[in-house]
Image (cartoon, rainbow, N blue to C red):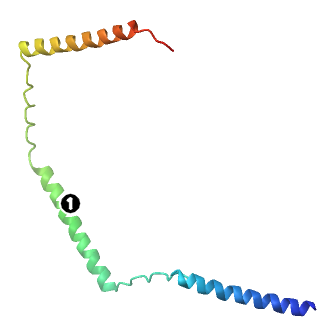
Amino acid sequence: MSIDTLIAEIDAEIARFQQARTLLAGSQGRTTTAPAKKPTKRKLSAASRERIAAAQRKRWAATKGAVKAATAKPEKKAAAPAKKRNMSAAARKRIAAAQKKRRAAIKAAKEAAKMVPAFF
């Protein structure tokens, strides 16, 4: 066998593999990667740009006018802060007693845990 025949056989084998690859890729719903199209840029006419600019200037003028009008008004006095609610003495005593009871239960549980011998 000469080198030329070997090269021709290798080229034929490569072509066969490429054909098989395209068939397999097509059966899986894949296609060859095509270059993505660049989105086209929208072009506006000069008249359209001028209309948009005029509308924006009008909006700015309206907001600036509203700001000037708002600052011209006299300031209102701040509302008095809401009255704080006070707790009655009886309610405070009930809460304090309940808290003491909870703390005593926690302390008793800790003491009981110390008394239990560990068998490890």
Which residue lies at the image location 18% right of the left edge and 55% below the top edge?
67
Q: Quadrant of residue 104?
A: top left
Residue depicted at 46% across the width and 12% down the height: 118
Is residue 74 rendered to the left or right of residue 50? left
According to the picture, the residue beneath numbered tag 1 turns out to be 64
Instruction: Give the answer, above or below, for where 117 lies relative to 68.
Output: above
Where on the picture, by quarter, is residue 34? bottom right
Horizontal side of 22 relative to 53 (left or right) equals right
Please, what is the three-letter code of the amino acid marked with disc 1? Lys
Q: Is residue 56 visible?
A: yes
Q: Nearer the viewer, residue 108 or 84?
A: 108
Image quarter for residue 111?
A: top left
| Relative height, residue 71 to residue 48 (above, below) | above
Q: In this view of the protein, which residue sits in the foreground, 74 or 83?
A: 83
Residue depicted at x 16% and y 61%: 65
- Foreground residue among 76 and 102: 102
Residue 17 image position (x, y, % from top left): 70, 85
Q: Position of residue 57 (x, y in %)?
A: 25, 70
Q: How many marks?
A: 1
